[in-house]
Image (cartoon, grey):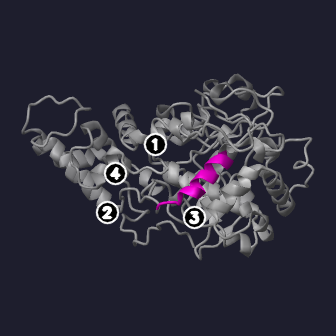
Amino acid sequence: MSHLQRDKRSPRRANANSPLRSPAALLLALAPMQACTDDVVDPLDPVGPDDPVQTGLVATVRELAREQDLRPVTLPAPVRGELVTLGRALAFDKILSGNRDVSCMTCHLPTFATGDGKSLPVGQGGEGLGPDRTHPDGQFTLRHSLALFNLHRVRKFFWDGRLEELDDGSIGSPAGEHLTSEMEAVLEFGAVSAAGLFPVSSREEMLGPGNELAEVPDGNFTELWSRIMARLGTIDEYRELFESAYPGTSFDDMTFAHASNAIGGFFASSFSFSDSPWDRFLGGDDDQLAEAQLRGARNFMTVGCTKCHQTDVLDARPGNEFHNDALAQFGPGQGDGPTGTDDFGRERATGDPEDRRRFKTPPLRNVELTAPYGHVGQFVTLRGFVEHYNNVDSTLVAYDVSQVEALLRPTLLHNYDEILATRDTMLLPIRLEEAEVDDLIEFLKALTDDAARDLSAVTPASVPSGLPIDRSR
């Protein structure tokens, strides 16, 4: 079971099948108060304590948040420093990749809010960093890099949820029996502790061709992980860091689970944030949200956003994590469909056709900083992503692929009928006026913790292998 704090509270929220409430209807209730003042207030000014309209908005948003059980982010318990030090070194060290040319953080750059600014990342064999990174053969990885914020509160990982913390605290993963009970016992922080086990096995992301790791057949995780540990064991400093992080255990008795657990501890310790204006508002400070942000928060909780974004980090509650949001498909795909360039999403993890094209609902904390958006980075601006949900059937067909980089544009699939055949029907009633889109964007900006804007201090000066560290700025 995870040693980090888990939310044990019973949910207290509106029925997910209840009719959507109109923001306009809620405003009618505030109309008498609005008529009481002729003051002109800048919509981005902080809430004025004597303004009855804004006071009414505060009350409305607080009541909606109470009904839907939205609360400030629960931070992780402190992670011991020795483990964080080891995890940071491993996350930034290219020694974990087959050809020693890419690290975990190459696609999760601190200077790009733990992403890379690209619709689809370029993994092993690439050149450059961030949006400028390219591959000499024009190769991309298969899905967009998810941000690393508040992963201690996440139970299902990757866009298809193939790694998950189960209800009994055990780990479900693609490794099956290769992830032994002894290895699971090492994982201190839930599924985030196991997240580092799998990118190293991806030939597009980290494994590459032509090295002793790439010789291991796909699916033989035990042998692959053993070979990576053998690499690390040739470096005295790594042996010392591992044994300092796990007192009383010899490096020679450790497995790659010890490495992945350290990376998870580093993620939880370094990228968890709980001091956004929205957190402070939920904590009781009425002056934290501007008028436009209050309207956006009200709209967020009434037009249907919280049917998917339900937790403190604004991802989905267990059992509701995956949805077909009618997003266009491009890129190399996962080998699905007639062309092999489609991606059937959650179905690839479960084998259930009912899960076709369903993808994980990502957390929204610090979302302002993490463009592009979508499972292949379909939208390069937050506005574009919000506007997609205004009549998704129409916005899918009208999707503008010119917003993504030129190499990806020809790969767009025009399989709109197939996507819409299984898109989530709860999206259909959503209609947004331009002003409502503006307010929703302002609310989403209120989910940003200012401490997440500059993460450059997270990057170490060096790593034990002596290999160069990727720094984008």
Tag 4 and tag 1, C-beta contact below 8 Å: no
Residue flagged by tag 2: what amino acid is it?
Glu
Tell me, yes or no, whether the highlighted magenta stretch contains residue 245: no
* Residue denoted by label 1: 366
Q: Earlier in the sequence, mark 3 or mark 1?
A: 3
Apparent side of residue 48 relative to residue 321 in the rendered image (left or right): left
Report x, y in % for residue 238. 72, 52
Report x, y in % for residue 216. 90, 54
* Front disc: 3 or 2: 3
* Front disc: 3 or 4: 3
Q: Earlier in the sequence, mark 3 or mark 2?
A: 2
* Residue denoted by label 4: 279
SS of the residue under disc 3: loop
The span picked out in magenta is 78-91
Q: Tell me the number on the disc at residue 67.
A: 2
Q: Earlier in the sequence, mark 4 or mark 2?
A: 2
The quadrant in which residue 151 appears is bottom right
Residue flagged by tag 4: what amino acid is it?
Asp
The answer to whether residue 259 is above or below residue 23 is: below
Tell me the distance, in whole angstroms, between the alpha carbons under discs 1 and 2: 24 Å
Apparent side of residue 311 relative to residue 92 in the rendered image (left or right): left
**Does residue 355 appear in this view?**
no
Residue flagged by tag 1: what amino acid is it?
Asn
Is residue 283 or residue 42 the one in the foreground?
Answer: 283
